[in-house]
Amino acid sequence: MDIQTKITKKDLNFINDLDLRDMLIERLKEMDRVFLVNGNYSTIFLALSTIEGIFKHIAAIFKAEIRESSIYPKNLKGNRKNFEKLTLNELHELLVKIGILPDIKNFNHVYQIFKDYRNFIHPQVQKKKGWAIDIGQAQMALGLLNATIDNLAQNIFIEKEIFKKWAGNPDYYSNRLHLNRHQTRLHSFLVMRQPLSNILSLNFDLELSKDSIFNFVFNFVDDGNFKMLRLDNRKRLGTPNCLLHCTQKDVWRIIFNADPLHPPKKTLFSVAIEINFPSKTFSFSADGYSYSFKDAGDNIIDLYDEIDPNKKIGFFNELGTVKLSKIRLKKTA
């Protein structure tokens, strides 16, 4: 019987380049094999080069912010170092500095230890250092790799905004966000890591399949405290487009119905959301139609009165698979 042993973590949904993701997955699979046959050198080289590849991909997204960092390294001539030549250790320090990776003392110390191991692919370098490589170093390198993937796998990078996964397994690549079905009521739930404070302009094409639900979340505090605007594509009574309020985990209630009560009949349509705290506006439109909301007395309510500043926004699908594409997001702090 062929027993499959999982050594490396493989949740790379934070990598939005599918070709790079597939390449990294192949490396991770190879590490599983070589570690089991005591390939300590190969394990270390593959682990560190994979971390470096992940860091370079994430760093490229935030290249401008990294180059402006006060700790951006210089070369021997005192000039700013070429971005493409940043080392594993330098990339790690810079990603910590701009807030992409956590600042964990012991975790950072391990990266420092391995900055020299990355160069041991050259035998003369290892000879000069006089350091041995055995299963202990291989285990440390794997632990560092898995901890790195675990940390980054909590996030989805949409343009330069970081969204945290709260449930399920949302996936983003080629400017398409897939909110997949999962074994929780929240299915795939993700929330922007930084709260709103000023202006948000968000536009995307929404693919809303039959019997699926899309929710735009705002006023998010945690998964038991938020509000959301719902587009409900179930074709039965009692499932209107609406504004809901969640006051405890997995429990929410309708507070206002929307006009129109149902999303566009077409499967794919555009959605535009504008939030402007200085001008006190909050608008939501689908397929070019601006939605309004009414209370039980059929009075139109101002959607802006329902939103609080300094809280977070997000998305989840609740039912069915929902896809967002051509996402354009502009946020003013």
Image (cartoon, rainbow, N blue to C red):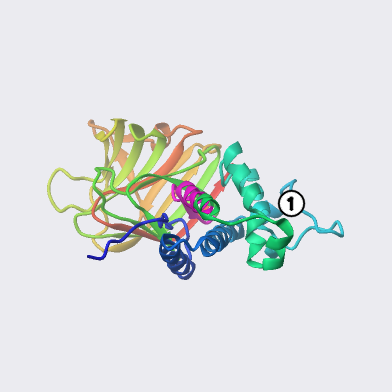
- Image quarter hosting the C terminus: top right
Residue 151 covered by magenta stretch? yes
Residue 92 visible in the picture: no
**Residue located 50% across and 36% down the image:** 280
- Asked whether 70 or 114 is in front, the reply is 114
Packing grade of label 1 (10 A; few <14, some 14-19, many >=20) is some
Provide the residue designation for mark 1: 72
Place residue 217 in its image quadrant. top left
Q: Is residue 302 left or right of residue 244?
A: right
Q: What's the magenta region?
A: 141-159
- Percent coordinates x, y for residue 281 in the rendering: 47, 40
126 shown above or below 231: below
Left or right: 220 with respect to 66? left
Location of residue 294 (image quadrant): top left
Q: Is residue 256 visible?
A: yes
Q: Of all residues shown, which one is farthest toward the left? A: 237
Q: Is residue 221 above or below residue 60?
A: above
How many discs appear?
1
The image position of residue 123, as x and y in percent, is: 67, 67
Q: Residue at x 43, y 58 (%)?
A: 12
Answer with left or right where residue 297 lies relative to residue 30.
Answer: left
Quadrant of the rendered structure where residue 208 is? bottom left
Looking at this view, is 168 or 52 the one in front?
52
Seen at 52% across and 40% down, the residue is 194
Q: Position of residue 84 (x, y in %)?
A: 68, 65
> Main SS type for the magenta part?
helix
**Residue 177 among those drawn in magenta:** no
| Foreground of the two, 326 or 14 | 14
State the SS at label 1. Answer: loop
Q: Report the amino acid beneath label 1.
A: Tyr
Quarter of the picture containing the N terminus is: bottom left
**Residue 246 location (% of width, % of height):** 30, 33
